[in-house]
Amino acid sequence: MTPPEKAVACNCSHCTRAGWLLAFVPAESFKLLSGKDQLQEYLFNKRHIHHQFCRTCGVHPFSSATDKNGKPTVSINLRSLEEIDPSKLQVQTFDGKSL
């Protein structure tokens, strides 16, 4: 993955409490390299975003859904990636609380 320069901070109840900083990629560009057997899905609110978390450590690494045009998309929690320094990212806010 090319390190992003920007991140999105959503103000919905889930993202705020979990402290997510997000980068969005088309689903076909995302490849999980390991740990699939340790993931558990969490759905809340309208139940259309498939949040994944690790059953071992509890980290929320990514979620999947469709974008506003119906295209499958993955949102990556940049805070879960060791090689990303969140303090170096420009952060754009998203009003998920109003959806």
Image (cartoon, rainbow, N blue to C red):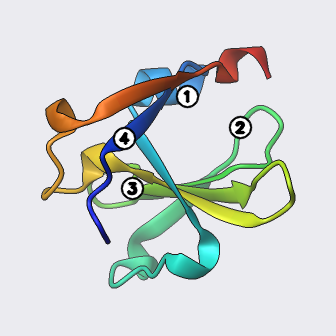
Q: CA distance from mark 3 to mark 2?
A: 16 Å
Q: Is residue 79 left or right of residue 40?
A: left
Q: Secondary structure at mark 3?
A: loop
Write down the residue under mark 2.
44
Q: Closer to the N terminus: mark 4 or mark 1? A: 4
Q: Position of residue 33 (x, y in %)?
A: 34, 84
Write down the residue under mark 1.
14
Q: Closer to the N terminus: mark 4 or mark 2? A: 4
Mark 4 or mark 3, which is nearer to you? 4
Q: Residues within 10 Å of mark 2 (few under 14, many from 20)?
A: few
Q: Amino acid at mark 3?
A: Pro
Say whether marks 1 and 2 touch (CB < 8 Å): yes
90 in relation to 52, above or below: above
Q: Closer to the N terminus: mark 3 or mark 2? A: 2
Write down the residue under mark 3.
61
Q: Is residue 85 visible?
A: yes
